[in-house]
Image: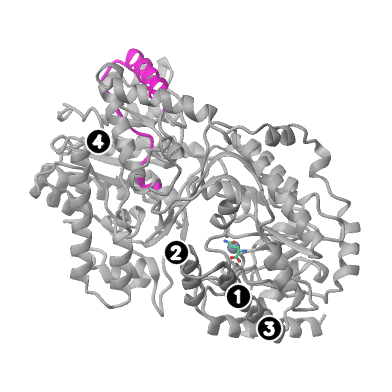
Amino acid sequence: MSQPTHPTFPAATILGYPRIGPRRELKRALESFWSGTTTETDLATAAAGLRERTRTHLTDLGLDPQTAAIPSDFSYYDQVLSTAVAVGAIPERFGIDASASINLADYSRLARGDAETAPLELTKWFDTNYHYLVPEIGPDTPLQYVPGSGPVAEFVEAKEAGVHTRPVVVGPVTLLALAKGTDPLARLDELVAAFQKLLVELAETGATWVQFDEPALVSDNGTIPAAQLNDAADRAYRALAATADRPGILVAAPYGDLRERFATLAGTGVEAIALDLVKGEIPDDGALAQARGLTLVAGLVDGHNVWRTDLHAAAERLQRLRTAHDGPVSVATSTSLLHVPHTVADETDLPEQLRSWLAFADEKVGEVLALTAGPEAAAEAFAASRTVRADRASAPGVRREDVRRRTGALTAADTERADASARAAAQQERLNLPPLPTTTIGSFPQTSDLRRARAQRRKGEISDEQYTEVIRGEIARVIELQTELGLDVLVHGEPERNDMVQYFAELLDGFAVTQHGWVQSYGSRCTRPSILWGDVSRPAPMTVEWTRYAASLTGKPVKGMLTGPVTILAWSFVRDDLPLGEVADQVALALRDEVADLEGAGIGVIQVDEPALRELLPLRAEQHQAYLDWSVRSFRLATSGAAPHTQVHTHLCYSEFGEVIDAIDGLGADVTSLEAARSAMEVVPELAQAGFSRGIGPGVWDIHSPRVPSTEEIVDLLGRALAAVPAQQLWVNPDCGLKTRGYDETTASLRNLVAATERVRAAL
Ligand code: GLN
Ligand code: ZN
C-alpha cells in the first residue's frame, strides 16, 4: 500500500493553548449563558472571538499561520467531552440525538446535568489539576462520527480567516482508557471507524495534519490493563493510518514516557510522534531505528510548569535527538499550555526578579521558537536564559541555610507519635465525645459579603480592624449555627480563606501569588496556583487567632484546620530545582510549627487536609512506592509533633481510593474523613479490609449538588458503614467542605445529619 504524502510537519509548534482567555472571557460567556442572561448565539460569538484572538496572537508571537503549527484545540468545557461528542458517545439518559450536531444547551447538560439527569462524572486528568468529564461507553452506547463536528468546524473557521491550523482531538485509546463502561476495549474498532470518518472529513476540508492526544500511553493507571495498551495502540493507529484520504497523523504523548509504546506507535504508519522530553527520555537507538523517516516532535519546553527553560540544556538534548534520529525533528512544548496562565507580562505586582525567572504560555511559545532557531540565531534568548538561571540559583531566599539545617537534621523519630490506642484513650478522656461524633469538614458557605470584605481589604477600602470584625462576626454566626444544630466537633468555618492553598501560600515565605494567573480547572472553573519559588518557612502563626476566637465562643471542641504539604504542592507551581520530597518536608515543618501553636492555644482537635494525595500519584506503577513514601512521610512530619491527647484528623476527597488505601492508613491520623456518599460508603469495607483501625468519617452528604439528603437516606448510609466497622470507629460528616453551598441547604442537610445520627445512636 502506498503511503499518503503530507507536507512537512512545522519546525516549531505547541501542543495546545489556554482557551479560557487572558481575562477569563470564556468563563464569563459560559456562566452568563447558563444563567440565562445571554443566548446560545452570544456564547458562540464570544467563543469565536476568543479563537480569533488566539490565532492572531499565536501568529504575532511567531508561529507559522500556514503550516499547521497553530493548534485548533478549542472546547466549550472539556476536550474529552468534545471528542466524545464528535464521535457520538452520548449516554442515552440525556435523550440527545447523538447522530446530529449538538447545541450548546445540550452540550452543557452533559457537563452539568439538570434536575432529572445526573451529569457525566468529573475527575482529574492524569497527574494534573485539570478535570475531565468521564465518557460513558458501555456495550450499547452509540459510536458514530457526527459530520461537521467541532474539530472540522474549527478548522474551517480558521481557514476562512486565513490560518491553516492543526486540529487536536483526544485519541481513541485515551478516550477508552478514561471511559466508564463494561469492557472499554470491546468498542475500540467501532470507535476507530468513527475517527476514520473524522479523518476523511478533515482531509476534504484541506487539513494537512491532525493531532491525537494519547496521554494514556504514558500511564499504567487507566481502566485498560497496562499489558493491553500496547496492543490497543497498535490496532487503533494501524487502522487510522490505513485510512485512504487523510491528513498526516501526529500522536502526542504528554506527561510522561512512552517507553516500549514508542516503537509500537512508530510501526503503525503514523507520520509523527510528539515526545514529552521534560518528563520522559530520548528513546534509545533500537527504538529510534523503528522510527526511521518519521517526524519526532521534541517536547522540550515544559507545558506544565512556569519556569523559564534552560535553553542550553534543551538545545543539547535536541542536538542529541537530531544526531540519533534518522528523520525530521521539530520542537514543541511537552504538553498543551492549558496548564499555565497566559502571560507573565500581566503580573506587574510580582517582584521583578521572580518575574524574570518565569515563562507562561506566551513566553513558552518564544522559547520553542528560540530553540528552533538555535543558539546562534537566537543568541540573545540563549544568553538571557543563562543569566536567569545563574540569578535564580544565587537569589536570596532560594536556598536558606536555616531551613536546610532543619530538614537535614530530621530523623525517623520526627514522624512517630505515641501508640494509637493510648492516643485514643487520652483523646476520649479530654474530649468526652458521644458515639458516632458529628462534625463538618471545615468550610461553611462563602457568602458574597465575605468575598466583598476580602476584596475591600485587598484594595485598602476597609481597615484590618474592620476586616477582622467582619470575619469574627461570621465565625460567631457559624459557631452559633453549629451549636443550635447540635454538632459535636465544631469548626470556625474558614471565612478568611479565599482558597485552601493560596491562603497559606500568602502567609509562608518562599511563595508568591499572581494577579491574573488563572488556569482552567474544569469548565468555567479556574484556579490561580501560587508559585513556590524558594525555601519555605513560616514567619508567624497562620490560623491560630481565628481558631482561638472560635474556641472562645463555645464549650465544645473546635477543630483547627490546615492544608497538608502534598496538597499545597499539588495545587501550586513548584520549584524545579529541588526534589519534591524535600520541598514537602519544608512545608511540613512549617505546618508542624502551626500545629504546635494551635495546641498551645488550647485546641484539642486539628485537621490536616490532603485532598490531593492521589492526584500526584505517578503515572507509572513502579514509581508509586517512592511517591507514597515521601508524601506519607511529609504528612506524618507535619502532624507527629502533636501530643497524644491532641486528636489529629485528615480529610481526603475523591471517590476511588484503591491504590492509596494503604497510604491512607500510613498517614496515621486519629480520624480520617473521606468522600463516600455517591459510592454508597464503598470505602468503609475497603479500609476495614486493609486493617484500618482508627476513626473513619465516610461522607453521608454529597455536597457537590444542592440536594438535601433525607434523614432516612443518612440512616441507611450509616447502617452500611456500621456493617463494616464497629461503632467506636465511626464518625458522621459531609463528603467535603461547604464553601460552595448555600445556607438553606446547609442548615437543612446538617439538621438531617444530626437527626439521623441520633436515631442510629439510640439503636446501638
Ligand atoms: N477544609 C476544607 C474545606 O472544608 C477541605 C476542602 C477540600 O477537601 N477540598 O473547605
Ligand atoms: Zn474534600
The answer to whether 28 appears left or right of 67 in the picture is right
- Residue displayed at 24% across by 74% down: 38
Q: In which quarter of the image is the N terminus?
A: top left
- Number of the front mark, 3 or 2: 2
Count neighbours of disc 1 (C-alpha within 10 A) and say few if under 14, some if 14 to 19, many if 20 or more.
few
What is the x, y in percent for residue 106?
A: 29, 70
Count neighbours of disc 3 (C-alpha within 10 A) and say few if under 14, some if 14 to 19, many if 20 or more.
some
Q: In which quarter of the image is the C terminus?
A: bottom right
Residue holding disc 4: 249
Which quarter of the figure has residue 366? top left
- Residue displayed at 26% across by 56% down: 86
Highlighted magenta segment, given as a residue range: 310-339
- Quadrant of the picture in which ligand 2 is shown: bottom right
Q: Does the residue labelled 3 lie within 8 Å of ligand 1?
A: no
SS for dot 4: strand
Q: Do the residues labelled 3 and 2 touch (CB within 8 Å)?
A: no
Q: What whole-number distance in Å separates the C-alpha atoms at marks 4 and 3?
A: 62 Å
Residue holding disc 1: 469
Residue holding disc 2: 459
SS for dot 2: loop
Q: Residue furthest top?
A: 323
Q: Looking at this view, is 578 or 426 the one in front?
A: 578
What is the x, y in percent for residue 161?
A: 9, 49
What is the x, y in percent for residue 547?
A: 70, 67
